[in-house]
Structures are given as C-alpha cells and as structure tokens.
Image (cartoon, rainbow, N blue to C red):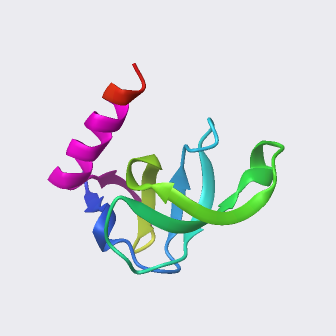
Amino acid sequence: MKTVKTNDIKKGTPIITNQLGYQVRGTMEDNLKGNTRMIKTNGSEVGMFDEMGSVYAWNIVSAKIDGEWVSVELTKKQIDVKSKQEGWLK
C-alpha cells in the first residue's frame, strides 16, 4: 500500500483527519514540517462547523496524492511525541 510522510503533504492537498472524533475531509493549509499542521476541516460533514486550525500530525489519516487516497505515515520523532502524549493521558 502506498503511503506519504506527514512532512511531505503540501498545502492544498486534500486530506482526511480524525481530530473531531470522526473521519472528515479537509485541506492542508501549510507546507511546514513537525508535530502540528494547519488544516481546513469540513466538520459540516458530521454536523459540526467547518474551520481552520492546527492538528497533530497523527490526526491526519489519509492524503490524496496524484488522484489516489494514500495512508499517512508518521516520522520517528512524531511517533515518539505521540507515545509521550498518550502516556500523559493515562
């Protein structure tokens, strides 16, 4: 299965995220790298508001690359930060 690293997703790329508790479509709104990315989310798909804001990289589930939806792969650093954050929530 084809994948893309979160750091390689470019501004304007259609994405699917799960930060709202549901998977919803949206658009990448930056070209940055790191643990958080700026997105526009289509919350209206699940009865919420459409909005723009930052999300953790691990909340980006899929990206549409060359017309095909592909899974998103985290970097080693993002995996480490996610693990630490999950540990804090216990």
Q: Is residue 15 left or right of residue 45?
A: left
Q: Find out whether residue 81 is within the magenta segment.
A: yes
Q: Residue at x 54, y 76 (%)?
A: 29
Which picture quadrant has residue 85? Answer: top left
Q: Is residue 54 left or right of residue 84?
A: right
User: How many circles with numbers are drawn on the protein?
Assistant: 0
Q: Residue at x 27, y 36 (%)?
A: 84
Pick the quarter of the image with the C terminus.
top left
* Vertical side of 87 occupied by 46: above or below: below
Q: Furthest-front residue in view?
A: 88
Q: Furthest-left residue in view?
A: 76
In the rendered image, residue 68, in percent from the top left (x then y), is placed at: 42, 64
Closest to the observer, 10 or 63: 10
Closest to the observer, 21 or 65: 21
Closest to the observer, 15 or 55: 55
In the rendered image, residue 74, in percent from the top left (x then y), is placed at: 26, 52
In the rendered image, residue 19, in percent from the top left (x then y), is placed at: 57, 44
Q: Find out whether residue 9 is within the magenta segment.
A: no
Range drawn in magenta = 68-86
* Vertical side of 17 occupied by 27: above or below: below
Q: Residue at x 62, y 56 (%)?
A: 25
Which picture quadrant has residue 41? Answer: bottom right
Q: Is residue 23 left or right of residue 43?
A: left
Q: Residue at x 31, y 41 (%)?
A: 82
* Vertical side of 54 occupied by 45: above or below: above
* Vertical side of 59 occupied by 65: above or below: below
